[in-house]
Image (spheres, rainbow, N blue to C red):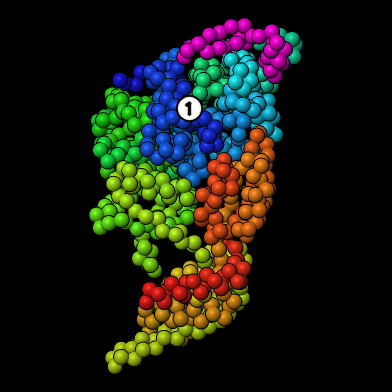
Amino acid sequence: MSSDYSTEKIRTFALVGAHGSGKTTLAEGLLYINGTFDKLGKVTNGTSELDYESEEKHRNMSINTHACFYVYNRHLVNTLDTPGFPVFLYQTDLALDISDFSILVISGITDSKEQIDRYFNLISKRDLPFMIFINKLDTERSDFEAVLNNVRNSLNINPVVLSLPIGAEHDLKGVIDILGYNASYIDGNKAVLNDIPDEMSQLASGYRQKLIESVAELDDNLLERYLNGEELQFDEIKAGLNKGVANMKIVPVVAGSASNLIGLHYLSDLINDIMPSPLIRNNLACIDKEGQLSNIKISETEPVICTVFKTISDPYAGKISILKICSGSVTPDSTLFNARTQSKIKLGQISKIIGKKLQPVNEATVGEIVAVNKIKDLNTADTLSDSHDLRVRLTQPSQTVLSYAIEPHSRADEDKLMQSIARVAEEDPTIDFHRDEETNDFLLSGTGQVHVEVVVEKLRSTYGVNVDLKTPKVPYKETIKATAKAEGRYIKQTGGRGQYGDAWIQIEPIANGKGYEFVDKIVGGVIPKNYIPSVEKGVREAMKKGVIAGYPVVGVKVTLFDGKYHPVDSSDIAFQIAGSMAFKKAMENSKPTLLEPIMKIIISTPEDCLGDVIGDINSRRGKVSGMDTSVGSNEVNALVPMSEILTYAPELRSITSGRGGFTLDFSHYEEMPSHIAQKIVENKKTAESEEH
């Protein structure tokens, strides 16, 4: 298989939307009706071809972005099925970074304004063209018009309806094609066209007029003809749609049911006919060697620019890097530069990818997605090009917010742990793994509890490493509430050359409670300039362990304003120690206090459990900030201390009889109540005394 498709005939898009909206089912349906799959897999029964990992099957959800493609009507269509669960959204970010457009999948029953906003914001911040697919309209209590109104009220867009459901809920039979103006029904895996039902003719006609008006408003010539009563032709409307979508003036809305293939044939036509090719973007945003933004003109010939947006680490097949060809063309013997390592890489075999299956190709061109195998020095977010100096601008990994101590079951597990978790980290750059300097524990950090659990299960099932999760360590911090001055004076005589360092500092709170600032106000050379960085180094070292309970210190401005030195005995180490001593003394007199991380939690709950859920949140020192009851769901938005929410998953399942769910994101740090802070200090001291 070679590159048989001109760039105008290539489509690359990401399916995005909330967990449970049906993205994977939609991707599988598109692949099935267009001949890539010979049977229709289902997420719910574990037969999905795309969600192939054991943990994805177990949890009935996508954990990774899965790349796939189909060929329809002489078009090559690359589809990226992305995770919808919030802790895995970095993969969604990367998929959107390299897509030419997106399809926002919205459930016809469960998605709330908050959920729709989240995924709309991911798309809109990239100025990415997109369409909306309203899914699951064959489900009880689904409501196309209610979802459409929710979209209109939530998003600052111009939604243009291109299809309407025929029937509702379990009686959904097909869709009305507003553009072609006919009805489409399903017979097996084929679409059967028919006349629009009489009872829907007036509704369909009204939406068609809105479509024509939306297109005409974008072109003065079309608008003049439309206002003069002239009928616009099908090809003119389609061309106007294509232009309006590419310019993000129009957002098409289509209806259907992915699980029953309703509306998917029409969706395939729209992807080909009105959604943009790779050339529509025209320029590619890259970072040059000075770190400046550089726009590169996209071409089918040169320059060659590829970016790695996903890595698969397979214990048998080895490392698989998935590339988007952003410009130019590549072949198996192509040699390119890795901008990160500044070294040459020969691609070797290149393949198209469907889930975990690879199909070798002889060539691939701009817009295509390919996989290359076993290239050691190639990581996610790397750029390959025929230049040393360019990097494609991709989203950086999100910050980890939750850490667990992990304990290997046996010495054999411990021996394999570091190498195995490094392989997992190749796939998932959002995890962090390190040994804690204080406790000597292995700490595994992620973006949420589910994220960490998935990593642990992957270690077990894929690499045969068994570990236990210990109680999560809450990353408390310390800060100060008052200004204080102190002297750090270090003198040591050893018979020969001694040590001498003397530093006066003032510490004061920073207004926003974040970060750290060091100010040099030494005058007259009382401390030589070459020793001032040593004082700061000592201060920074002291800030690693605060005076209350040994937690890192934040939100402090440190001013070095006086000191003394000895022309013979002063040294870097002496002033480091003096700086550390001064900081500790000053902090003791500056009303030190403990800070705790506060998490933003969004809880989905049945209405009959709403009161119990809110009461439980209040009992955890939480503050409810809002509620959303739109589109068939009840959501509670709250801010809760991390220490109160670490074991929330099983407790929410108990409160809601397994019907509730939640997402968790770090919000900010906040001062702890004094009586709780005192318990934290006592527990820390008890733990330290037991260790010694």
In the image, is 226 to the left or to the right of 68?
Answer: right
Residue 537 is covered by the magenta coloring: no
Identity of the residue drawn at 36% across and 86% down: 499
What is the count of numbered marks? 1
Identity of the residue drawn at 43% across and 50% down: 452
Q: Is residue 529 visible?
A: no
Relative height, residue 637 to residue 10 (above, below): below
Q: Nearer the viewer, residue 312 or 459?
A: 459
Q: Nearer the viewer, residue 482 or 203?
A: 203
Q: x, y (%) of residue 10? A: 44, 22
Badge 1 is on which residue?
A: 25
Quadrant position of residue 325: top left
Q: x, y (%) of residue 505? A: 52, 79
The magenta-colored residue range is 181-210
Q: x, y (%) of residue 551? A: 48, 69
In the image, is 4 to the left or to the right of 506?
Answer: left
Relative height, residue 116 to residue 489 (above, below): above
| Quarter of the rendering occupied by the C terminus | bottom left
Q: Is residue 412 visible?
A: yes
